[in-house]
Image: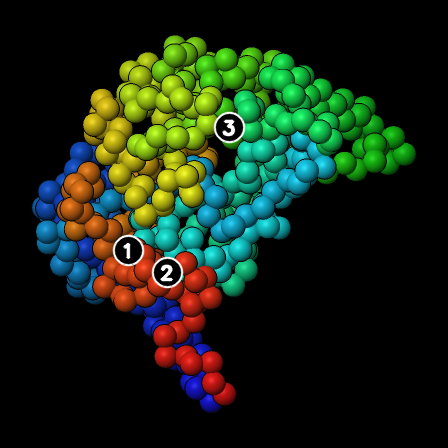
Amino acid sequence: MKKVLFSIFAAGMTIATINAQEKPIAYINAKIIPIVGAPIENGVLIVQNGKIVAVGDARTVRLSSNVTVVDAAGKVIMPGLVDSHSHIGEGSGADGSSPIQPDVRLLDGLNVRSSSLQRAQSGGITTVNVMPGSGHLDSGQTLYIKLRDDATKVDDLLIYDKDGIYMGGIKFANGTNPMRSGGGNFPGTRAKAAALVRDQLIKAQEYRDKFKWAAGEATKLPARDLAMEALVEVLDGKRVVHFHTHRHDDILTVLRLQKEFGFRVVLHHVSEAWKVADEIANAKVPCSIIFIDSPGGKLEAMDLKAENGAALEKVGVLVGIHTDDGITDSRWFLRSAGMAVRAGMSRDKALYALTMANARILDLDSRVGSLEPGKDADFIVLSGDPFSVYTHVLETWVEGRKVFDRANPKDYLIAVGGKGASDGHSMHVDEDDDGGN
């Protein structure tokens, strides 16, 4: 009986939340960092039905009589953070059967009940590009998700484009990760790695040409090939290539392949980007970079510099920052931007890298990444300046719903760690539910 009562209560709370959103909510007296404009010291943010209705200062934004007012004095409000490269959700991609597997979909390998999703919420992250691993030249299709609460299946987290298709890119890699000896036709050298990628893209071109030649005539159509279909989407610019790469020569190999085949690409990690920043800028290719502040890791990343962000900013490259969680913890995503500033990146561009830059990288900049009317009501409430070591994420909101509250004991456990913090089961069971009948 206890379980039944809990379910009724939970349903009632959901209805109350939805109904509350029909009435606009105004957060007043906060410092608002909209990202696309200057910070607003005495700001007002109004949200309704999961969208941002208005944002501005108290002198220009008028409150209607039916608005619910929340006094956020002393707090900072900024957009929900966008992580352009993460491995939360325990996702699995390609296997050891071959080095290039574009038909593999992370959609079929994501655990929505993993506590890692709540951990990301506690760090202020609201939108994520979840990636398969980089042990393959192509390890499969990535997934763009919103960190909504109460997900019971992966569909509950998906982001759909204007045509109703769930969104994602595709993961490529070069360098040492996909190089190995033994079976499965994996490359043993960097040159062979590039040759294998080139070979598959040429096959995709030929597959696409067969469809053009068939002109819809069923007897002339080639047999359906899911791997080739995904690579044709790459060639046609419909699916962005998220390319794991570290060394300067590997970076240039990616740019060479991109120029040859014309696909859209984002360079990820790019440890030695500072060595070839001009070449990246000339290719007009964005970068998603990472900050590591402890020794160790792989030899090809030994020349990683904290000044990477500053070097790319200087030459006009669009720069996003990512966690690569669990390489760096999603809870400390803001800290990565702080490290970028300490190494010479501008404050504005570092915050932009956590929000709008990553939104642009994921083709989501019309929906997330900044506080603007019409965009999704994804925002975070901070206790202070985003770059202060004393600042905490107090609340995280996704589409007008609170998904993290540091004042909640269960959420607090996720934020600070401790016994049970990594238990995905307990994160999805009410504290009062003892499992009895």
Circle 2: element type: loop
Amino acid marked by disc 2: Ala
Q: Earlier in the sequence, mark 2 or mark 3?
A: 3
Foreground: 203 or 275? 275
Q: Is residue 130 above or below residue 213?
A: below
Q: CA distance from mark 2 to mark 3?
A: 30 Å
> Residue 296: horizontal and vertical position, in percent?
39, 30
Taking the spot 70% from the left edge, 24% from the top edge, the residue there is 200
Taking the spot 83% from the left edge, 35% from the top edge, the residue there is 223
Q: Which mark is residue 244?
A: 3
Amino acid marked by disc 3: His
Q: Find disc 2 in the rendering and name its residue.
A: 421
Q: Earlier in the sequence, mark 1 or mark 2?
A: 1
Q: Is residue 303 above or below residue 435?
A: above
Q: Residues within 10 Å of mark 2 (few under 14, many from 20)?
A: many
Taking the spot 37% from the left edge, 53% from the top edge, the residue there is 119
Taking the spot 65% from the left edge, 21% from the top edge, the residue there is 188
Say whether residue 297 is visible.
yes
**Color encoding of the figure:** rainbow
Q: Earlier in the sequence, mark 1 or mark 3?
A: 3
Q: Is residue 169 above or below residue 318?
A: below
Q: Quadrant of residue 195?
A: top right
Amino acid marked by disc 1: Val
Which one is in front in this view, the residue at disc 1 or the one at disc 3?
Answer: 1
Q: Find disc 1 in the rendering and name its residue.
A: 416
Q: CA distance from mark 1 to mark 3?
A: 30 Å
Outermost residue, right direction? 219
Q: Residues within 10 Å of mark 1 (few under 14, many from 20)?
A: few
Is 181 situated left or right of 389 in this image?
right
Quick check: marks 1 and 3 in contact, CB under 8 Å?
no
